[in-house]
Image (tube, grey):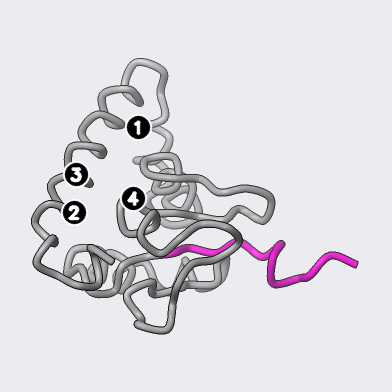
Amino acid sequence: MVDKLVTTPHLFYDGSCRLCQREISHLYKSLSRHFVLVDISDPSFVGWNGVTRNAMMQKIHVWDGVEFLVGLDATLYYWDKTHLKLLSQLLSLPLIKPIAGYFYNQWARWRVQKSTACDTCSG
């Protein structure tokens, strides 16, 4: 028998990041219908299903019930379940997605560098 918790979609977010916190708060009603929301900044969180907390702090992660989606793919996946579906579809277009991915990766790198003073983000 497959564990229901493992097959349920999970959205792993950094509750210590003000931007992440604001976005999850804004989308909470829609997201909570589709995902188990996991704040990875909680000191008791060490990782999940083979992915470390440190890896999840680098880029947002979504467990879709089968596999992990990371970074822009994770964001587009959970936006697709909210009122941001149209934006998700737009950013998924073949000519736009590589550009959006580039900017997401730059932002994620900046966020981690900015957070190096933060024990939560660096460990």
According to the picture, the residue beneath numbered tag 3 turns out to be: 109
C-alpha distance separating marks 1 and 3: 20 Å
Badge 2, how many Cα within 10 Å: few under 14, some, many 20+? some
Query: Mark 1 or mark 3: which comes first in sequence?
Result: 1
How many numbered discs sit on the rendered protein?
A: 4
Q: Under tag 3, what secondary structure?
A: helix
Which residue is label 2 attached to? 112
| Image-based side of 49 in relation to 117, left or right | right
Could you tell me if the residues under marks 4 and 2 are in contact, i.e. CB atoms within 8 Å?
no
Question: As drawn, which residue projects farthest toward the top?
Answer: 95
Q: Amino acid at mark 4?
A: Lys
Which residue occupies 50% across, 55% down?
62
Circle 4 residue: 59
CB within 8 Å, label 3 to label 2: yes
Q: Residues within 10 Å of mark 4 (few under 14, many from 20)?
A: many
Coordinates of residue 120 in the picture (x, y in percent): 25, 72
